[in-house]
Image (cartoon, rainbow, N blue to C red):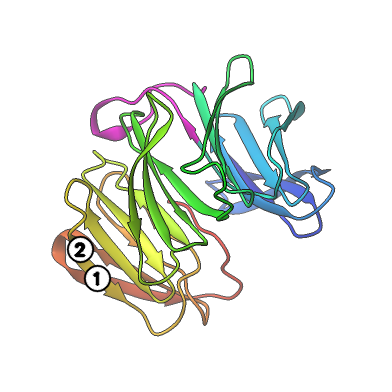
Amino acid sequence: MKLVAGSYERFLWGWEVKEKKKQLEWAFSYPAHLGAIKCIASCGSVVATGGADDTIKVFDLNAQKDMGSLYKHEGAVTCLQFHGPRGAGGAPVSNHPTHLLSGSEDGSIFIWDTDSWIHLKTMRSKKDSKGAVNDLSIHPTGMMALSVDRDRHLKMWNLMSGRCSFTLKLRSEASIVKFAPQDGGSYSMVRDAVVEVRDAESGTVLHPLEHEKRVLCLAQQLVSHLLLLPRLPASFPTWCPSLQGLGFCGRMSGILQVEL
């Protein structure tokens, strides 16, 4: 197992996870971008990074090889997500994805084919829309996606047609949106210090999870419906929306992003 992290100093760092010894062993460092690394996505051994230099870099961790760069965005790449075939319960059935979605400060979302790494589609709700995309999430079926932008919009995208099918004006800017990985029947949206778990069909708020400080990132567990929500100051409350309660709360320093 490998752990990767991106830095403001443009480097991609990698460690081998020694599970039995509970240790991290440094594996590599690579100057991936000309500016800060803004986001990372992974599927199997394939890792993609988005940078402030408007570029997406693709790496093969097993071979420790730079597979090349994707140039299309006209702004910093702010979010990335891979998609591939999924089995029962939403678990991936392949270590190689079929598609990659990327969002940017230029307001666009691109669909990429991961076999030939070609650009398939540009999605933008309006030709003159320049609201930076903060985050995006692909439904487990791969047929639709959600995005949130700096203009305080939540948008639903039909990935079959490449068009925006629904737009909702939010009361405040959302920084994160994530479909439930099990079946996509709900999604979580972060707005400052509040996380709203909403029904995917109606948009009804199922569980408002309030915090004292701003939530920095969100991780969802595939099998047990847990949400891990690091916030400022550095603590990580863990919620179980199905039980409508707080599971436990721990503390550690310097949390910027987590994954379960």
User: What distance separates the C-alpha of mark 1 from that of mark 2?
Assistant: 7 Å
Q: Is residue 185 above or below residue 100?
A: below
Crowd around label 1: few <14 · some 14–19 · many ≥20 (10 Å): some
Residue 238 percent location from the top left of the image: 33, 67
Residue 167 percent location from the top left of the image: 34, 50
Report the span colored magenta: 82-97
The quarter holding residue 83 reads: top left
Residue situated in front as seen by the camera: 77 or 219: 77
Taking the magenta stretch, the answer to whether it contains residue 94 is yes
Q: Is residue 17 visible?
A: no
Classify residue 260 as left or right of residue 221: right
Task: Using the image, tell me which numbered label, if any, was put on residue 205.
Answer: 2
Taking the magenta stretch, the answer to whether it contains residue 255 is no
Q: Is residue 212 above or below residue 23?
A: below
Per the image, the residue denoted by label 1 is: 208
Q: Residue furthest top?
A: 116
